[in-house]
Amino acid sequence: MSIDTHPHHLPTAAPEPLPYHRLAHRLPGTARWWRPLASIGTAAGLAVGGALVVILAIAIATLVAPPSWRPSELLDDPRNPGDMLFMLGFLAIGVPAVVLGSRWGGGMRGAIHSVALRIRWGLLLRAASVVVPLYALVLVGSFVIAPPPDFSWPAADGRTVAVFAIVLLLAPLQCAAEEYAFRALPQQALGTWLRSPLWGILLPVPFFMIGHGYDWVGQIDIAVFAVSMGFLVWKSGGVELAIVVHTANNLVLFLLAPFSPSSLTQGTVEPWVLLLSLPLTLGVTAGLTLWVSRTHGLRFFEPVRSVPSVVAPRADLPAVSGSRA
C-alpha cells in the first residue's frame, strides 16, 4: 500500500440531479434568499425599458407610415400591420428581459431555459413537428366548419402580407415571452425557497388570467392552459414544450385573425368552445408527458432532472492507491 500525494485520483461526490424549479441549488451562490428578488426585479426593469423602446419605435414609425398602416386607437385590428406589430412586439420583449434577468439577477447562465442549461432545440423541433400540424388541423377545421359571423376575405395587398409576416416572426416570440414570464421565472424563483413545484405552477395562474379579458368561460380555458403549461415545464425540465404548445395555438389563431376582424376582441366566450379547447390542451399535455416519460424512463409525475457535471477533486485530501508485489 502506498500513499499518492497527487489529489487528482479522488473526486468528490457529484451533486444531486435537480428538477427544473430547483436549479438555483446547483451552486450555493445562486441559492441565496435574495436571488429570486434580484431576478424578478432585473427582469421587470428590463421589461419596462424594452417597452419604452418599443413605444418610441412605434411612435416614430407612425409618423412616417401611411395612414392605413398606423396603429388604430384600440390596437385590436388584425388587418392592421401597426396593431399586430405593437401587440406582438410589446410582449416579445419579455424574452430578453427574463433571460437576462435570470442571468444578471439570479446569476444562472442558461438555467432559465432548461435543466441542460440551454434551449434543447432537438426536443423543441420534434415536438413542433407534431403539435403545430395538430393544432392547425383542429383550429382551421373548426373555423371552416363553423365560421365566425364576421368572416370575410382580407384585401390582397401589402398590408395583409405584412400582417402575416409579422405574425410568423413575432407570434413565437410572444408565446415564448409569456412562458418565460409566467412559467419559467416563477417556478425557479419560488423553487429557490420552496421544495414543492406546485407553488411555481399554481401561484402564477391568477396573474396569467388577469392578462386576458375574457368572461368566466374564457377564464376557465386560460386557467387550464396555464396549469397544463406549468406542469409541462416542470415535467420536461424546461420551457421548450410549453413554448411549442403555446405557439401552435396562438400562431394558428393569429394567422386566422385577418379573416375575422373581431377575433382579437376579448370578452364573451361561448361555452361550447370548452368542448374543443379543453380536450385539446389536456390531450396534448398528456401526450407530451407520456413521450417525455418514455424517452427518459420516468414515471408520469416524475420530472426530468439536471445531469450532474463532473466535479473537481478536493485538493485537501490525498488519494490512496494500492499495489501488489
Image: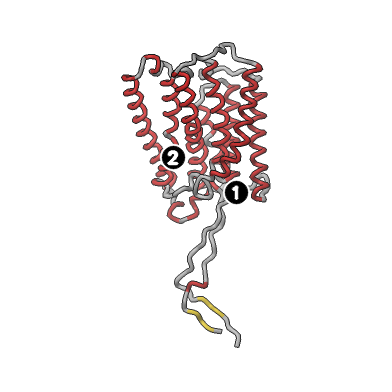
Q: Quadrant of residue 125?
A: top right
Residue 243: where, in percent of width, then height?
54, 36
Q: In the displayed image of the protein, which residue is found farthest to the bottom?
A: 325
Marks 2/1 in contact by CB < 8 Å: the verdict is no
First in sequence: mark 2 or mark 1?
2
Query: Taking the image as drawn, is residue 207 in sight?
Result: no
Residue 45: where, in percent of width, then height?
37, 37
Query: Taking the image as drawn, is residue 289 in sight?
Result: yes
User: Is label 2 in a helix, a strand or a loop?
Assistant: helix
The N terminus lies in quadrant: bottom right
Q: Quadrant of residue 271?
A: top right
Residue 208: where, in percent of width, then height?
51, 31
76 left or right, relative to 291:
left
Residue 278: numbered disc: none
Residue 165 vertical placement versus 191 (above, below): above
Residue 6: where, in percent of width, then height?
47, 76
Q: Residue at x 50, y 29 (%)?
A: 168
* Nearest to the observer: residue 83 or residue 303: 83
Rendering colour mode: secondary structure
**Local crowd size for mark 2, using a 10 Å CA cut-off: few (<14), some (14–19), many (≥20):** many
Q: Residue at x 50, y 35 (%)?
A: 176
Q: Residue at x 47, y 35 (%)?
A: 177
Q: Which residue is mark 1?
A: 304
**Local crowd size for mark 1, using a 10 Å CA cut-off: few (<14), some (14–19), many (≥20):** many
The amino acid on which the numbered mark 1 sits, given as a three-letter code, is Val
* Cα separation between marks 2 and 1: 22 Å
Q: Which residue is mark 2?
A: 98
The amino acid on which the numbered mark 2 sits, given as a three-letter code, is Val
* Nearest to the observer: residue 209 or residue 33: 209
Residue 31 vertical placement versus 175 (above, below): below
Residue 190 vertical placement versus 87 (above, below): below
